[in-house]
Image (cartoon, rainbow, N blue to C red):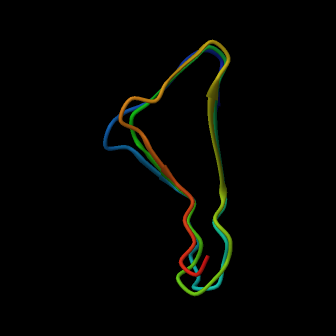
Amino acid sequence: LTAGHDITVEAGAKIDASAKNDNASGGDIIIFADRDLSFKGTALANAGALGGDGGFIETSGRRNVDFGTGLVRANVSLG
């Protein structure tokens, strides 16, 4: 997700790139604001329940990042 200026991810918003199969890896989430990022939502890229790797999550802004109450997880069950 990229924007020309600012990005806001509100509380209650959920971006989920978690594995859809038991032995799969999580996907990638990239949230890059050209200026300011306000992130108060949830981003998930978890591995499958029986294996796989956690995914990659980047949250960034060129000028300012307000992470607030945001939650980011790329967990593995059998790590």
Q: Is residue 9 left or right of residue 49?
A: left
Residue at x-position 38% and y-position 43%: 13
Q: Is residue 55 left or right of residue 8?
A: right
Give the vertical position of 79 relative to 62 (above or below). below
Q: How many marks?
A: 0
Image position, residue 57 (x, y; %): 63, 48
Residue at x-position 63% and y-position 12%: 63
Image position, residue 79 (x, y; %): 61, 76
The picture quadrant where one finds residue 28 is bottom right
Q: Is residue 45 left or right of residue 28?
A: left
Residue at x-position 52% and y-position 82%: 49
Q: Residue furthest left?
A: 12
Q: Residue furthest front?
A: 79
Question: Which of these two is toward me, 76 or 48?
Answer: 76
Give the vertical position of 25 relative to 16 (above or below). below
Give the vertical position of 78 relative to 35 (above or below). below
* Residue 6 seen by the camera: yes
The picture quadrant where one finds residue 59 is top right
Image position, residue 15 (x, y; %): 49, 50
Give the vertical position of 18 relative to 59 (above or below). below
* Residue 1 seen by the camera: no
Image position, residue 26 (x, y; %): 63, 66
The picture quadrant where one finds residue 69 is top left
Q: Quadrant of the N terminus?
A: top right
